[in-house]
Image (cartoon, rainbow, N blue to C red):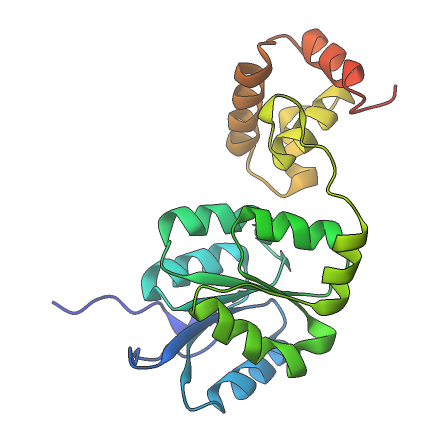
Amino acid sequence: MTSEVPAPERSGARAERADRAKTTVVIADDHTVVRQGLRLLLDNEEQLQVLAEAGTVPDAERLTRAHRPTVLVLDLNMPGGSGLDAIPRLRETVPETAIVVLTMQDDPAFARQALQAGALGFVLKEAADEELLEAVRLAAAGDTYLNPRLGARMAATPAPAGPPDDLSERELEVLRLIALGHTNSEIAQRLLLSTRTVETHRAHIQHKINRTTRAELVHYAIEHHLVTL
């Protein structure tokens, strides 16, 4: 029985049969021109092979699970969710795939969050021609690559204190919006999540901080300076 090949019309490009003698790559970016340029850059290297392309976060996760490439090149801003949120999910479901973030976000906070979530590389799109190949090679070997300019800025900026009660960054976002009076459906729309996912985040928050009512959640958020009302 042959394995199912992801449909090209969903991934936005043809899918290749993997040559496991090479470093295999899936590209995830919502701009077709960018994906085409990255494919040319990577496929021009003899030891690299691009297997598939994705234009949304769900397709990036689906194609990565289907192809299990050596490296996923992942944009942070795509339709269908947050690339940052996808990183830990992918690290859990496809641990053999290293993740290299390729983004326009030059804020050190994004780099820090991506690396903490499990990415091995963080490359700015403006420097992709010079840095992406090196980042992919290092990630394939289990090593880390960080854009040098961002690395210098991160070194000069101490990491912020961790969130209270081990809340994740996404849980903090949900808690802030709850405290500001938003409903679960409104939070889902603002964060590009499903209402069920927001409900799950809320349940985790309530369990971690041992608060249940909206009033208690609001009080907790104010007490920990998460919102100013």
**Outermost residue toward the right?**
229
Answer whether residue 105 is visible to the viewer in this image: no
Q: Position of residue 151 (x, y in %)?
A: 72, 61
Answer whether residue 2 is visible to the viewer in this image: yes
Left or right, 146 with reference to 18: right
Residue ID at (63%, 43%): 192
Q: Nearer the viewer, residue 187 or 137?
A: 137
Left or right, 196 with reference to 192: left
176 above or below 139? Answer: above
Q: Where, by quadrant of the figure, is residue 141 drawn? A: bottom left
Placement of the C terminus among the 4 image quadrants: top right
- Marks counted in the figure total 0
51 above or below 80? Answer: below
Q: Position of residue 179 (x, y in %)?
A: 75, 20
Residue ID at (61%, 52%): 114
Q: Position of residue 227 (x, y in %)?
A: 82, 24
Q: Nearer the viewer, residue 206 or 195?
A: 206
Q: Nearer the viewer, residue 25 or 177?
A: 25
158 above or below 98? Answer: above
Placement of the N terminus among the 4 image quadrants: bottom left
